[in-house]
Amino acid sequence: MGLAENPAVEPPPGRRRRPAQSFTRNVLERLDTKRDEVLCFLGDLEVPFDNNLAERDLRMVKMKQKVSGTFRTEDGAIGFAIIRGYLSTARKQGQSMLAVWQSRD
């Protein structure tokens, strides 16, 4: 029904490349072509419904930039990302962040 409500834009005569479609049409086409990936969580309960974990990982970096304005050096930003990634992975695997931090050597 969605594809019928949002028909594809036809290219003008003589034009070779594909014309730009509406945002709605693009989303509907993507959902249709990636149906198995979109609905994977229905058959496999290990697959999360959304990607909030990935978004939460980025949120801390954005908050740090917002509070301090920016990272002072590129090395500081890289170090911050490494530490956050390490601790985030430990948390996702159900490990104690304090325990993995103490045993990192």
Image (cartoon, rainbow, N blue to C red):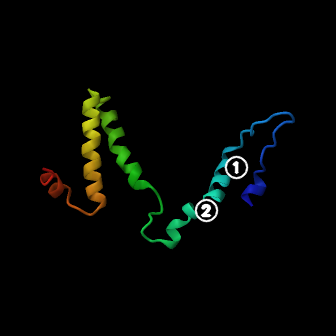
State the residue position of label 1: 25
- Give the class, few, some or many, for how many residues have Cα within 10 Å of label 2's Cα (few <14, many ≥20): few
Label 1 sits on a secondary structure element that is helix
| Three-letter residue code for mark 2 | Arg
Where residue 79 sits: x, y (%)? 24, 37
Where residue 63 sits: x, y (%)? 33, 39
At 74% from the left edge and 56% from the top edge, which residue is drawn? 3
Q: Are marks 1 and 2 in contact (CB under 8 Å)?
A: no
Q: Nearer the viewer, residue 80 or 15?
A: 15
Q: Nearer the viewer, residue 60 or 44?
A: 44
Q: Earlier in the sequence, mark 1 or mark 2?
A: 1
Q: Quadrant of the N terminus?
A: bottom right
- Give the class, few, some or many, for how many residues have Cα within 10 Å of label 1's Cα (few <14, many ≥20): some
Where residue 11 sits: x, y (%)? 81, 39
| Three-letter residue code for mark 1 | Arg
Q: Nearer the viewer, residue 33 or 28?
A: 33
At 34% from the left edge and 34% from the top edge, which residue is drawn? 66
> Relative to 64, is 72 above or below?
above
**Mark 1 → mark 2, Cα distance in angstroms:** 15 Å
Where residue 5 sits: x, y (%)? 77, 54
State the residue position of label 2: 35
> Relative to 26, is 92 above or below?
below
Q: Is residue 29 left or right of residue 52?
A: right
- Indicate which label's residue lies in the foreground, 1 or 2: 2
Name which quarter of the figure residue 62 lies in: top left
At 42% from the left edge and 69% from the top edge, which residue is drawn? 46
| Dot label at residue 53 | none
Label 2 sits on a secondary structure element that is helix
Q: Is residue 29 left or right of residue 101?
A: right
At 23% from the left edge and 62% from the top edge, which residue is drawn? 95
